[in-house]
Image (cartoon, coloured by chain):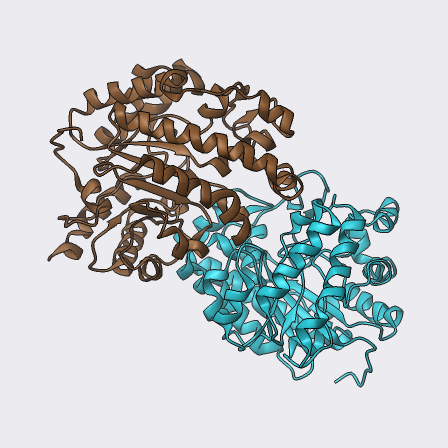
Chain colours: A brown, B cyan
Amino acid sequence: MKNENLHNDLILRAAKQQSVERTPVWFMRQAGRYLPEYREVRKKVDFLTLCKTPELAAEVTVQPVDLIGVDAAIIFSDILVIPEAMGMTLVIEENKGGPRFTDPVRSRHEIELLRDIEPADDLRYVHDAIKLTKKELDSRVPLIGFSGAPWTLLTYMVEGGGSKNFRHAKEMIFNNPQDAHALLERLAEIISKYLSAQINAGANVVQIFDTWGGILSPDAFEEFSLRYIRQIVEEIKRDDEPVIVFCKGCAHALDTMALLGADVIGLDWTFDIGKAREIVGGRTALQGNLDPSLLYSNPERIRHEVIEILEKYGHHRGHIFNLGHGVLPDVPVENVKAFVDAVKNESGKYHTE
Amino acid sequence: MKNENLHNDLILRAAKQQSVERTPVWFMRQAGRYLPEYREVRKKVDFLTLCKTPELAAEVTVQPVDLIGVDAAIIFSDILVIPEAMGMTLVIEENKGGPRFTDPVRSRHEIELLRDIEPADDLRYVHDAIKLTKKELDSRVPLIGFSGAPWTLLTYMVEGGGSKNFRHAKEMIFNNPQDAHALLERLAEIISKYLSAQINAGANVVQIFDTWGGILSPDAFEEFSLRYIRQIVEEIKRDDEPVIVFCKGCAHALDTMALLGADVIGLDWTFDIGKAREIVGGRTALQGNLDPSLLYSNPERIRHEVIEILEKYGHHRGHIFNLGHGVLPDVPVENVKAFVDAVKNESGKYHTE
C-alpha cells in the first residue's frame, strides 16, 4: 500500500469494478512517435538509450498526461529489455521492420547460456524511471508498469525479431516442447520479480502484454502462454495494485482468461466488447477496444465509434477505455486528442448509478 | 447438374452433411511450392504465366491428387486475377513480400476507371484450365473453384499489396465508406459471375477466401465483408455444388456466418473446432483446422494433432479436414503426406453410424 492520495484514481476504481463518474481512458504506446514532443526527445538519443535513461524515460512517460489528458501514465520502456538483460543483443531500428536480436536462441544449449537476472538490479533503470516518474506525476494520475508475457518474449528470442509464420518458435513448441517450457519457466520467474519490483518502485497498476498469444491454437495457447501468465498473476497479485492481462487475438479464450486471477482483461478491436462482458460476467473488468486505425479518420467519426463501444459495454462498472492495440505512429495528434476527449465527454451518462 | 459419377465424392457428401466412410481432406495452396514437381514447372514460367496457361495450370492442379492423395483438386490460380483483369498491373515476385499492384486504387475516380469485366470472357483462361483439369482428373475426385472475397480483394487493390496496418483500406472505409461500397458492390457482382462460370466450366465446389476479414471490428466486418459474401452466396447457390466460405480470424462471427447460406464454413487454427461445431449447430458443415506450421514438426506429432481435431469434432457429420490456412512453402513433403495419411487412417472410427 502506497499511502498515496491520487487526484485521479478512475482507472484503479474501474479496474476493481468500483463506481466511477466517467469511463477512464489511456492507450497503449501513448508515449510514442505520434507525439511531436516525443520525436524531439528521440532526436537526441536512440530508442534503447531512451529506455535506459530514467530522466528521459520519465519525461516522455509524462508527455501524454500533460498533452493528451489520459487518465494514467505507462512507464516508457520496451518488452525486450528482459531478454537484453539476459545477454541477448538487441537492435532497434525504427522504420526497419521493428526490433530484432542478432543472436536468436533456438537450442537447449543456447537457452542455458542465457544469464539469470535479478530484475531489481539488472533492470534497475526501469525502476529508477518509475520512481522519477512518480515524482513528476505528483499523484495526478496512476502509473502503469508492464512486461511482455513469457510466450511473446519467447517468440522474439527464438525468431530474433518479428515474423510472418513464426517458424522457429513453432518448431520449438512442436518438436522440442521441453526446451520451450524450460525457457518459459525462467521467463515467468523473471517477469514475476520484474513486475513486483515495478510495484515496489511505485507502479499503481501492471499490465502483461501477450502480443503473440493469438498465433497459437487454443490448446497450445493454454500450454505455452496462459499457464505462465496464470503463474505470474498468482505470484504478483496484491490488494491494491490491479493486474491487467492483454492478449491480441485471444478472445476465443475469454472464458478461461476470466479465471486467471487478473483484475482486467484487455481486448483487441476484433471482438464485440458487449459480448465479451457477457462472457466474463463480472469476473474481471475489461479494457478496450477501439480499432487503432480509426485514428486515421476524423474527430466526428472517432466520437461516433467511441459512443458505439460505450453503448455496447452499457451501464456497467469495470470498463477502462483503450485502443485495441498500440497507437499507430503516424496518426494525427488532433485525432488522438479527439479520441480521449470523446471518452471523457460521452461516458458520464453510463455511470449514473 | 453434371451427370458425373465421381469415384471419390467424400467432400461433396461431407459438405452436404451426408454420411461418409471417413473424413475427407484437402488443403489450401496444395498445388504449390512445397512440391518439387510444382517447382519444376515454375522453372519454366513465372507465376502469372502459369495461371494463364491452362495446360500448365491443369498440370499443377492435378499434382497433389497424384502425389499426396488429397480428396479434391483446387484449380491453380490466384485471387488477384480479378483486379488484374479490371486493368490493374499485378507484379508477383515470390520471396519478395508477396504480390502487389503498382497502381493502387484509392479514390472514387480511380475506382471508376477500373474496367467492367465479363469473367466468362476476361478470365476465360481460368475456365479453360478448369475444363482441362476435369478431363485429366477423369472423375477421380471433385474439383474446387475459388475466388477472393470482395473485402480481401479491396484490401489488395487499395493497399497495392500486403500490409501491416492496412492504413489505406481503413482510411477508405472510415473516411469514404461510399467509395468502399462502390468498389465492393462491383466486386461482388463480378465474383458472382466468375464463380458461376467456374461451376459451369466444371467446378464441383467453390470456395470464397476472405483472408483479411479478421482485421475488421465485428461491425465493420458485417458492413464491409459479410454482406457482400452473403450477396454472392445467394447469387451462386445451386443444389449440387457446395459453397465454402473461409475467413481468417473471423471465428467471433461464426454464429452469423452459419446463416450466410454457405454449405461449409472454413475455420483457421486459432479456434476450437468442437466449440465451433456447437456454435454452428448443424447449420453448416465445417472445414479445418490444423495449424499449418505443424507441418514443420514430424509425422508422429502431426498424427497426434490430427487425432485431437477429429476427437474435438467428434462423431458427427459435416467435417472436411484442412489446414487452418495455406500450406507453407517450405514444409517437408513427407510431413504433408503424413498429414493427409493421418486423416485417412484415423478418421474412419468417427463415422461408424
**Camera-nearest residue between A245 and B54:** A245
For this view, does A30 lie left or right of residue B316? Answer: left
For this view, does A19 lie left or right of residue A182? Answer: left
Q: How many marks?
A: 0
Find residue A217 and report its horizontal and vertical position in percent: 55, 52
Q: Is residue B265 visible?
A: no
Quarter of the image with the C terminus of chain A is: bottom left
Q: Is residue B239 above or below residue A38?
A: below
Give the quarter of the image for residue B188: bottom right
Find residue A279 and report its horizontal and vertical position in percent: 35, 60
Q: Is residue A192 above or below residue B216?
A: above
Q: Is residue A115 visible?
A: yes
Q: Is residue A344 above or below residue B318?
A: above
Give the quarter of the image for residue A194: top left
- Residue at 49% from the left image edge and 71% from the top image edge: B278
Find residue B227 and report its horizontal and vertical position in percent: 48, 69
Quarter of the image with the N terminus of chain A is: top left
- Residue at 87% from the left image edge and 50% from the top image edge: B37
**Camera-nearest residue between A226 and A286:** A226
Find residue B235 and report its horizontal and vertical position in percent: 59, 77
**Camera-nearest residue between A270 and B146:** A270
